[in-house]
Image (cartoon, rainbow, N blue to C red):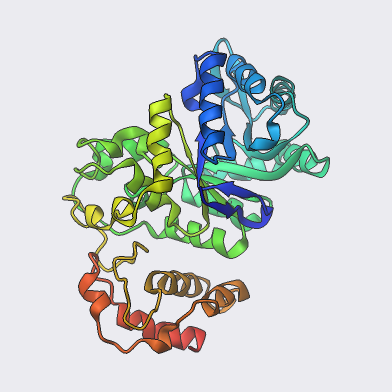
């Protein structure tokens, strides 16, 4: 298992994290088996969004004596009423649910307190200026929350939260189909068939801006919906062709700022399929040709950081250099020293490019690599 730093939180999280959606309605034995399998394979982070008291009790019992094994991302603003999950902004209910969470988990704190499901700018503004944010920041100041996070499906709302400086972590839905769609307040559109009619071209610029701004500002990105609720794994995928579990995971993990993907396994077998990513080779992780062959989607001219351009005869890590170039271009004159530092740390730089063009012959997306290398020299100076 590989571990990544979750933005400015400093937390080290496993690339594969454990989502708990599939634990709903299951007993303590199942919960223990899932946590045991995760721990045995190096998983050290878990997302718990559900306020289901039975689920919280089972996880609390399964974690007894080993809370330290997980970086726990838990959600504020979720309540359990009449046997159903519900989102709320009523502060007294938010407080009661958080106290219930800590009690049932048998802990005094969680590592990330995630303000749940903010999918519109209006909702974000109300959260930012209201009692929910004041409560989250107070819990952080008191040490009951290590970092403040927010979950969203809307890049506009998520970007506003990132730019506010109030949020340390964003949980966002990331996969190669959702990334094509423009921002919207109705997350149902992400899996509606009509959203993918016709030909869609390249990543939505607001989504790319969100990922790059997270990287720039040190906001950690945790990923949900990497499989699109399972749709991307079937021939009924919105793209018209199935991807593998490993390909979906690798796509999410190659986005800027992405630290971990929370997989919502509903069985030991499903969790094992995701854990197979750890030992998958480059050919199994490779999503580039699959994306290039999608019948209804085009990424022409857009670097997907897939690494198909390698190996460079001069030893340049073209995908990494291009990622830093895109981050610097997005930030303009405000490009951070961190981006320059990461670029400088590369073993070889754009100035080493001889313009042979082999990388361009290998690229499934027609990226003008040689032009990018010239631009990198202009920006970085080497």
State the residue at coordinates (39%, 51%): 250
Vertical comparison of 345 with 154: above or below: below
Side (left or right) of 83 relative to 311: right
In this view, which residue lies farthest toward the left?
295
State the residue at coordinates (27%, 75%): 359
In this view, which residue lies farthest toward the right?
142
**Image x and y of residue 115, in percent:** 62, 38
Task: Name which quarter of the figure residue 64 lies in.
Answer: top right
Counting the numbered discs, the total is 0
Tell which of 372 and 11 is nearer to you. Answer: 11
Tell which of 52 and 213 is nearer to you. Answer: 52
In this view, which residue lies farthest toward the top?
82
Residue 189 in view, yes or no:
no
Tell which of 147 and 199 is nearer to you. Answer: 147
Vertical comparison of 183 with 314: above or below: above
**Image x and y of residue 351, in percent:** 42, 89
Side (left or right) of 8 relative to 359: right
**Image x and y of residue 319, in percent:** 38, 69
Vertical comparison of 321 with 300: above or below: below
Residue 229 in view, yes or no:
yes
State the residue at coordinates (45%, 82%): 348
**Image x and y of residue 339, in percent:** 56, 73
């Amino acid at each position: 298992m590989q571990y990544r730093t979750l933005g400015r939180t400093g937390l080290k999280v496993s690339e594969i994290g454990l989502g708990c959606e599939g634990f709903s309605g299951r007993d303590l034995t199942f919960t223990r088996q899932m946590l045991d399998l995760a721990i045995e394979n190096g998983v050290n982070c878990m997302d718990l969004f559900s306020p289901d008291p039975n689920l919280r009790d089972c996880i609390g019992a399964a974690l007894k004596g080993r809370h330290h094994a997980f970086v726990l991302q838990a959600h504020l603003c979720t309540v359990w009423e009449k046997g159903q999950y519900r989102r709320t902004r009523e502060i007294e209910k938010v407080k009661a649910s958080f106290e219930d969470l800590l009690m049932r988990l048998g802990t005094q704190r969680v590592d990330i307190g995630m303000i749940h499901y903010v999918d519109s700018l209006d909702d974000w503004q109300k959260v930012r200026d209201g009692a929910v944010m004041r409560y989250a920041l107070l819990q952080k100041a008191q040490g009951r929350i290590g970092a403040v996070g927010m979950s969203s499906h809307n890049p506009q709302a998520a970007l506003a939260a990132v730019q506010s400086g109030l949020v340390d972590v964003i949980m966002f839905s990331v996969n190669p189909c959702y990334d094509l769609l423009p921002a919207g307040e109705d997350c149902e559109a992400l899996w509606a068939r009509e959203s993918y009619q016709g030909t869609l071209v390249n990543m939505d610029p607001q989504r790319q801006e969100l990922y790059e701004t997270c990287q720039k500002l040190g906001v950690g990105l945790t990923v949900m919906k990497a499989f699109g609720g399972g749709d991307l794994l079937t021939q009924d995928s919105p793209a018209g062709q199935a991807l593998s579990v490993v390909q979906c995971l690798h796509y999410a993990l190659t986005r800027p700022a992405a630290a971990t993907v929370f997989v919502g396994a509903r069985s030991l077998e499903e969790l094992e399929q995701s854990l197979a990513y750890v030992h998958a080779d480059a050919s199994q992780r490779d999503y580039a040709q699959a994306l290039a062959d999608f019948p209804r989607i085009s990424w022409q001219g857009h670097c997907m950081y897939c690494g198909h351009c390698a190996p460079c005869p001069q030893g340049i890590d073209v995908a990494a250099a291009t990622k830093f170039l895109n981050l610097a271009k997005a930030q303009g004159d405000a490009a951070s020293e961190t981006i320059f530092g990461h670029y400088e740390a590369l073993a070889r730089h754009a100035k080493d490019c001889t313009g042979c063009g082999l990388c361009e012959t290998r690229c499934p997306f027609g990226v003008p690599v040689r032009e990018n290398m010239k631009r990198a020299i202009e920006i970085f100076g080497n």
